Image (cartoon, rainbow, N blue to C red):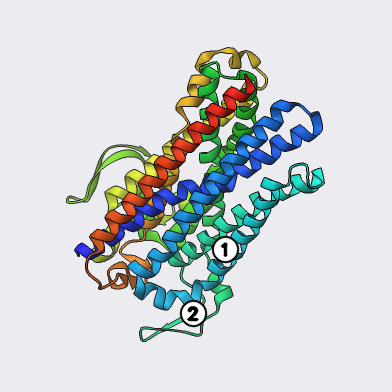
Amino acid sequence: MENLEYARLQMAFTLGFHIIFACIGMVMPFFMVIAHRKWLKTRNPLYLKLTKAWLKGVAIFFVTGAVSGTALSFELGMLWPEFMKHAGPIIGMPFSLEGAAFFVEAIALGFYLYGWNKLPEKFHWFTGIIIGISGVASGILVVSANGWMNAPSGFDYINGEFLNIDPVQAFLNPAWFTQALHMTLAAFVATSFAVAGLHAFQILRGNSPELHKQAFKIAISFGAVAALLQPLSGDLSAKDVAERQPVKLAAMEAHYETGKGVPLYIGGIVDEENKEVTNKIEIPNALSFLAFGDFDAEVRGLNDFPEDELPPVAIVHYAFQTMVGIGTLLMLAGLIYFISLKKKSWMESRKYWWFFMLLAPLGFIALEAGWIVTEVGRQPWIIHGIMRTEDAVTPMPGMKFSFFLYLLVYITLAFTVTWLMKRQIKVLNEDTE
């Protein structure tokens, strides 16, 4: 079990880091091309400075995302050889296509980085769009592979053998669309609010306020729209999970008893030993409606499932509550931003900028909580209903040494990126003054 726990810890830790790098790399190119477009239209040097500053950020996160993603790809084979033995031929398509998208992104980034004053302006700007589209495509393709783990398809499982493999059907598994939509919107929400919060902080400090206000508006516009769309995506995801993974839904809401007209819990303390939730707020019939579109629909409880097939209920429930709570707050923040476009006096208040500065980390906290729901909520399965996680782990001893090595590498990456970004912001402020 020590091997299994260290393997789980290593995968969770490295994926938790990589998802931040990957999401920023997916979204920041779109900020960059909007600023670039404004430069081409207005020839205001402020937008050119902003474009080049964000370009440096895109390059930094492209490199760190590539490093952390490469390490993760090695981990799949190193930590979970039994999984890769069977899953590799089935979900190889999205991984190979992701590799192609990565190379397209790298080529486009090369054009964009070194194309200033060398390429036609419109073509140069268009290569920035290719960077963004390729990054989003990479994310969607990886999430498709993860969706297959939640909704295995494209094969027949006979006597422990994976037969009649159909890679296209596996790629377009029943979970891919809802997961990819939810993840893509989450990436835009998290990155946009983080970037907007950083620029709000610079405004509060009085550093190049005009530049940072324009940067804030570009970033928060993406985040506000994505935050308002996210509840619709969440509703689709919840209905999909209710149909395919009812035990995960029950863990998300910490519902133990099967029933009709089941209430939705807000908050609550989970007592896994006594199988109950205390100190909760109940909304009558709401879970039945959200899961199945019917206020009287039956929702299966955790007690309907074998004990050895239950995920860690408390972790899943708290993560889900965190994700939904933060998502609701960021949706309200998006509304506040759109109202402030009419009530411009709001932007003159320091409280306004403090509010958005304090929101900066929340999107990524919600993002991490969502991945905990997805991954921990699937346990004890690595392939839902087919292969248990404990049966996929490597038999080789010494996984704790691997864990501490990866821990060191990723912490070093985090400190390096933080130092580089602080340096870029300082240079940007000095160049603008």
CA gap, disc 1 and disc 2:
22 Å
What is the crowding at mark 2: few (fewer than 14 residues within 10 Å), some, or many (at least 20)? some
Q: Can you tell which quarter of the image residue 345 is in?
A: top right
Query: Which residue is nearer to you in this view: 325 or 262?
Result: 325
Closest to the camera, between mark 1 and mark 2, is 1
x and y, in percent, of residue 207 in the image: 56, 19
Query: Which residue is nearer to you in this view: 8 or 223?
Result: 8
Q: Is residue 26 toward the left or the right of residue 6 in the image?
A: right
Q: Can you tell which quarter of the image residue 265 is in?
A: top left
Q: Is residue 84 toward the left or the right of residue 303 in the image?
A: right
At horizontal 49% and vertical 49% (from top left) the residue drawn is 64
x and y, in percent, of residue 222 in the image: 62, 37
What is the crowding at mark 1: few (fewer than 14 residues within 10 Å), some, or many (at least 20)? many
Sequence-earlier tag: 1 or 2: 1
* Residue 19 appears in view: yes
Q: Is residue 184 toward the left or the right of residue 379 in the image?
A: right
In the rendered view, tell whether residue 117 sits above or below residue 390: above
In the rendered view, tell whether residue 280 sits above or below residue 305: above
Label 1 element class: helix
On residue 98, the disc is 1
Q: Amino acid at mark 2?
A: Phe
On residue 155, the disc is 2
In the rendered view, tell whether residue 213 sits above or below residue 145: above
